[in-house]
Image (cartoon, rainbow, N blue to C red):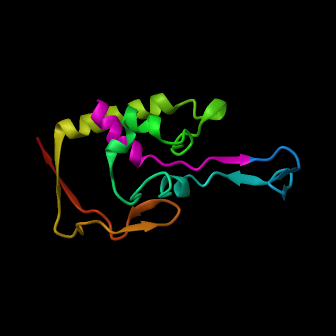
């Protein structure tokens, strides 16, 4: 279960969108009431200042020891603080349970059409540039 959690964490992404309640000034920049403010979580999660070699999938970045070493707001897939996602624990549990059931019943094999290593595209969400083709075999 601990290893599964390490694998899931780098896969999570979320854009936290807020709306300003009133006019305000932040670092000299006027922000009008009703402006949509979005945390650039994708940029944050791929910032080499916090994540050396951010394009690499390294689950060990999410061990408890590694967590103590990084900035507390360098990883925000569910937001943070009092306005963080209330469903985080349930969502993570659902993902783990679903993955466990699938992995218990099926074996995944790549098809020849799948490019290895994968080329990634970055649009609104990160994903494989040319798709992933897999076969599922019952265990």
Q: Is residue 8 magenta?
A: yes
- Residue 116, position in %: x, y? 22, 67
For image coordinates 44% across by 53% down, the residue present is 51
Question: Which one is in front, 1 or 63?
Answer: 63
User: Going by the picture, which residue comes out furthest to the front?
Assistant: 69
Range of residues picked out in magenta: 1-18
Question: Which one is in front, 87 or 119?
Answer: 119
User: Going by the picture, which residue comes out furthest to the right?
Assistant: 23
Left or right: residue 97 compared with residue 20? left
Quarter of the image where the N terminus is located = top left
Above or below 91: residue 53? below
Question: Which one is in front, 75 or 128?
Answer: 75
- Residue 7, position in %: x, y? 32, 42
For image coordinates 17% across by 64% down, the residue present is 111
Quarter of the image where the C terminus is located = top left
Above or below 17: residue 121? below
- Residue 55, position in %: x, y? 39, 60
For image coordinates 44% across by 46% down, the residue present is 12
Above or below 101: residue 53? below
For image coordinates 63% across by 51% down, the residue present is 39
- Residue 117, position in %: x, y? 25, 66
Left or right: residue 14 compared with residue 109? right
User: Going by the picture, which residue comes out furthest to the left?
Assistant: 139
Left or right: residue 95 compared with residue 16? left
Above or below 68: residue 17? below
Q: How many marks?
A: 0
Question: Which one is in front, 9 or 129?
Answer: 9
Q: Is residue 108 magenta?
A: no
């Amino acid at each position: 279960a601990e290893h599964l959690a390490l694998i899931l964490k780098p896969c999570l992404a979320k854009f936290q969108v807020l709306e300003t309640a009133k006019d305000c000034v932040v670092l000299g920049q006027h922000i009008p009431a009703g402006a949509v403010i979005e945390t650039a979580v994708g940029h944050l999660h791929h910032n080499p200042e916090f994540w050396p070699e951010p394009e690499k999938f390294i689950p060990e970045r999410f061990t408890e020891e590694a967590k103590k070493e990084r900035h507390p707001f360098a990883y925000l897939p569910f937001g943070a603080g009092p306005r963080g996602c209330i469903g985080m624990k349930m969502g993570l549990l659902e993902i783990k349970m679903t993955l466990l059931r699938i992995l218990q019943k099926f074996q995944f094999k790549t098809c020849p059409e799948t490019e290895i290593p994968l080329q990634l595209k970055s649009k609104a969400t990160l994903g494989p540039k040319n798709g992933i083709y897999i076969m599922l075999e019952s265990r």
